[in-house]
């Protein structure tokens, strides 16, 4: 039986090796290395836009493939590569991509929810002081 390591980007996982079984289990262990450099290389994040995807065409494209003939007499690895190629071709035709948006992509990783709350309090206190609703001492205490 073949175990798969699935990722959302090419090149994130490397050195995949099949190890021995764990104890008396008939399952094999899979060892792999996560490549951090490949993950940092992508600065513009894109995701599949499932809202605008044409799933009817996607289903039709994959349904047209004669899977019995395409996979006949092939090993598991070869079958997987053929299936993956057809799947990615259909995905490229049917599912548009969009730039990932949201606050999580615009802020540094160290800026957690607690720090975001404190920055928001500081901005609100400044706005209140500028409008004359908050005293200078109260604003400085908040800062």
Image (cartoon, rainbow, N blue to C red):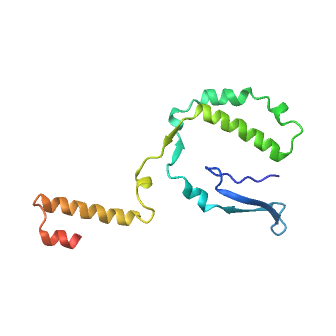
Q: Residue at x 66, y 38 (%)?
A: 88
User: In the rendered image, which quarter is residue 53 located in?
Assistant: top right
Q: Residue at x 25, y 64 (%)?
A: 122
Extreme residue toward the left, this view: 132
Q: From the viewer's perspective, tell me whether residue 67 is left or right of residue 14.
A: right
Q: From the viewer's perspective, tell me whether residue 96 is left or right of residue 131.
A: right
Q: Is residue 92 above or below residue 35?
A: above
User: In the rendered image, which quarter is residue 128 located in?
Assistant: bottom left
- Residue 102 in percent (x, y) is at 42, 49
- Residue 132 in percent (x, y) is at 10, 60
Work out whether residue 66 or residue 22 is closer to the camera in this orientation and state it. Answer: 66
Count of numbered labels shown in the rendering: 0
Q: Residue at x 59, y 60 (%)?
A: 37
Work out whether residue 45 or residue 55 is closer to the camera in this orientation and state it. Answer: 45
Q: Residue at x 77, y 39 (%)?
A: 82
In the rendered image, the quadrant that contains the C terminus is: bottom left
- Residue 74 in percent (x, y) is at 87, 41
- Residue 91 in percent (x, y) is at 63, 36
């Amino acid at each position: 039986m073949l175990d798969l390591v699935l990722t959302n980007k090419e090149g994130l996982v490397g050195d995949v090796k099949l190890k021995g079984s764990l104890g008396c289990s008939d399952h094999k262990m899979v060892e792999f290395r996560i490549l951090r450099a490949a993950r940092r290389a992508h600065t513009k994040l894109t995701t599949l836009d499932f809202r605008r995807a044409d799933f009817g065409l996607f289903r039709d494209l994959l349904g047209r493939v004669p899977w019995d003939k395409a996979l006949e007499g092939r090993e598991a690895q070869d079958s997987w590569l053929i299936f993956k190629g057809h799947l990615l071709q259909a995905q490229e035709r049917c599912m548009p991509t969009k730039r990932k948006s949201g606050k999580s992509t615009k802020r540094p990783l160290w800026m957690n929810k607690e720090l975001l709350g404190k920055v928001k309090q500081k901005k609100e206190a400044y706005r209140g002081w500028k409008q004359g609703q908050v005293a200078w001492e109260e604003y400085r205490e908040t800062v």
